[in-house]
Structure formats: C-alpha cells, structure tokens
Amino acid sequence: MSDPPSATPAAVTSPLTLLPGAGILAATLGIVFAVQWALDATSAPGIVRMGARIPGALEGRTLLSSTWLHPSAWQVLANAGFALVVGSLVERHVGPWRTWLIFVVGALTGNVLAAQAQPDALGVGAAGGNWGLMIAELLLVLIPALRGPVQRVPWAPAIVGLIALNVVLSFVPGFGSWVHLVGGVGGGLALLVTHLGAGVWSVVGAVAVAAHALALAWALVDGRPWAVGSELSGPTVARTFFDGMIEVELPESLPGGEGEVVTYAGDLWRDGVSADFVIAHGEGADLSTLEQAREAYGADEGVPIDCGERCTGRQAAFEGGAMLGAARAYGTVWLVTVVVLADGAPPASRDWAREVLTAARLTEQGVRSVDEAAWDLEQNGDAAGAVSIREALVGDHPGTAFVLDQLAWTLATHPDDGLRDAGRATELARRAVSIERSASHLDTLAVALAEGGEREEATALLEEAVAMAPDDPEIARHLEAVRSELSLRE
C-alpha cells in the first residue's frame, strides 16, 4: 500500500471513487469483527480479552487495540462504511499511509480522553478514528493548500453538512460527545503536522499501523478469548482473603488472594465473574453488607435465594449483570460472599458463581478472630451471644479444639440455669481432649463432669492435669473444689 506518485491523485476525478487505502481500512474493521463473532467475543468478557479498554484502567496496548473492536454488526458496518467513504475522500489528497495515520491518531486521542472522561464505560469502536478522518476532510475543503496535486473537492457542501450532523449527534445521550470531537481534533492535527515531509510521515503511518496490529495480536494471544469460562473448571488452589481469615478453593487462572490483604477473586471484565469475600460484625450486618453491595452496583431490590442453613441469600439484577450474595451466620458475625456476573458471562461462569457462593471457609486465623468476638460478648455480659457464635464455629469447624474448649467451659460453669448444659459441655470437652490432651482441656472436661455429678472421673482428670501443669493455681483450685464437692460455677 505505497503512496502513489503525484500524477496518480490528479487522475482521480470521480467523486465516487473508493480508494485502496480506505478500502483496506474498512475491510480490516470487518475482518476483526468476523474474528470476534467466530470467538463469541462481541461482549464482555470476550471483547475485553481481545483488547477492549476496560473501566478504570489506562493500558497502553488497549488504547490501540480497542479501536478495531465493536460490540455489534450494525456498529462495525456503520464505522467501516464511514471509513471507506470519508477515508477515500481524504486519501485522494494525502495518499493511503497518511490517511491511516490520521485515522489512528484520531482514534488514539479519542481513546485517551475516553479513558479519563468515561472511566466507567467499556471502550471500543472506531468512532474517534472516523472523526479524525472527517475533520481532516473538512480542513481539506476549507484550506486548498493542504490538498496537494488533487485540488477538486467533491460534494463540499455535503461534507460540511455531514460534519455538522455528526457534531449534533455526538451530544445525543449514548454517543461519545467530547470523545468524538477530540478524535476529530487529533485527526485534524495529524493532517496539519504531516503536511510537510509527507514521505516521512508515510513511514510513520506504516509504523503506527504495525503497532496497532501488534496490539491486537498481543491481546488475542494473551487474552485467549476462546477460553472464557473453560478456565474456571481447571485445576484449583486454596487461596486466602481478608487478611488471611478466609480460604476458598479457586481455579488457578483467577487472580487474587494467597496471603495478600485482598477480598476479591476474578475479574468481572475479563472472566465475566468476580467474587468478594469479607467478614462483617454486628446484628443485621448480613443484610447491611448485602445492601451495600447492591447499592454499589446500582442493582434492583432483588429476591431472596436459598443458600443453606444459617445463611441469608439475595440475588439482584443491574444494568450489565447480576449480583448474588450469601451471608453465613456465626451468631452476630457473618462470612459474606458477593458474586457478580456480567451479562455476557458463559454458562460455565454462571455454574461456578453458584458454587463459589457458599464455598468460602474460615481459616484457623479467621476462626480465632470470630472467637475473639465471642469472647468480647462474654466479657460484656452476653454469654448467650458468645455461645451462639461458638456453636456455629463448632458446626463448621468441628476439629478446632480451642473453640470446643471455650464453649464447653461456658456451658459447664455459667450461673444461668437456662444456659448451663453439663451434658453438652462434657460432650464438647471430650472432643477437645481427643484432639489435644492438654492440661487446660483436661481441666475443662473435669469441671463439666463435676457439674454433671461425675466427680470421681473429674478428680482423676484434674490430678492428671495438675501433674501436667503443676504451676497452674487455677487447676489446683479446681481439684480442691471437686474433692470438697464445691460448685465451680462462675
């Protein structure tokens, strides 16, 4: 696609002549969309993996690759047709490579502004590049010195009218507004800057086109749009979240976790699904946390969903996706999971979302943190609240000896007859001793047995505990109390 000699442009006299540079430009837009369609990558997450500019990110390569991507057939047809017609009008004066350079500069300047002015929008499309061509053609109409060998400008009034119409349309809701105009400014400046030394700028145009092609190829190879969803069924690894307090088995391909102070896994734009894991404290924190998530996404009121025992679940829809939330109760402490699905997420992502909604578990560190909440309640006189938290912990983590021991102690020694339960305390304490036969655990078991009237076994266990911890005055005091048949209720 070399620039023609000066005699060639002069020979182009028909206003309807469609030139090769613009034709290849339009065809490229169509070919890229055909690849998108074949890979089912016309919406997130597929289009993101092909190089769309995602909200909140300003990545160099996506400023290039996003120009060539479109979410629908009518949009690519409109942009490709516009590029073919207006690009041919520009090409007759400046040649193919400068035409391409004007297009890519317009697209790039529009994309840079869009990343700043529309941080919440998914960025794709060739509108900025087309606006660059359009403003360049306007300048060619208005400034004869820029036209080169071909001085005749077909349809000058129509061109001006077309530009005026596009300016008006750009401020209709849903259009690119200032982003389009900035793309036009970029294209116009590219025409003016490249007016001198056109041969050199043709080389620059070729390099710019190569850079765009490289950005597209890089996005395709790195993003693997054909793998959307399938990666979620691959090998899994245990990852930790919320400062190491929550653990979830997740596919290796999903980002996030593993010891970092993070709360999320997955990328909504790239994977079509993301999950957020937090621990919330307080009465009603389940509903308030899910409500905060709903408001953050602008979702509707939603409907309750079943997520199992001791679990509050809710599903809500928002523009572009859906939110599923589940809050698992540990008394007044909640393990909350919020999963967000994009509308374009494949079935595999939806299946995984339902699985991960109830897959999160407390780590040992998380169990200790929740148990500390129980301890705080107990110290503030709410023993029933502490028992509620620890009973839930024991249900989910039956092998955690220190929780078994703490719960058993409260049930064995609390002065409230309605709360005290020597039989349950003995059961829990025996389980703790079977996991770890320590002096402290033997002490708790002995106190529970004594409360239930089994003082002989209690005495034997306390004697063993004293032998293991001879310097512990509390265990020695308990032994004397049991021998004297005194109450150990607190």
Image (cartoon, grey):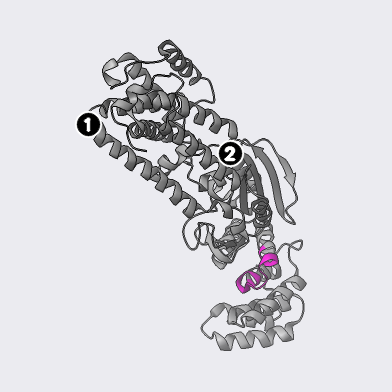
Q: Residue at x 68, y 85 (%)?
A: 459
113 to the left or right of 457: left
**Residue 142 x %, y %:** 33, 14
The amino acid type found where label 1 is placed reads Gly
Say what secondary structure mark 2 lies in.
loop
- Dot 1: few (<14), some (14–19), or many (≥20) neighbours within 10 Å? few
Task: Please report the residue visible at 59 percent of the width from the left and 37 percent of the height from the top.
Answer: 295
**Circle on res. 197:** 1
Residue 56, given in percent of the width and then of the height, sits at: 45, 41
Give the overall secondary structure of the magenta segment: helix
Q: Earlier in the sequence, mark 1 or mark 2?
A: 1
* 428 on left or right of 229: right
Give the amino acid type for the residue marked by disc 2 in the picture: Tyr
Dot 1: element: loop
In reply to whether residue 12 is colored magenta, the answer given is no
Q: Name above or below for residue 82 compared with residue 36.
A: above
Pick the residue in front: 226 or 460.
226
Quarter in which the C terminus is drawn: bottom right
**Residue indicated by mark 2:** 297
Residue 356 lies left or right of residue 240; in this view the side is: right
Q: Is residue 331 visible?
A: no
Q: Magenta residues, as a range?
A: 393-405
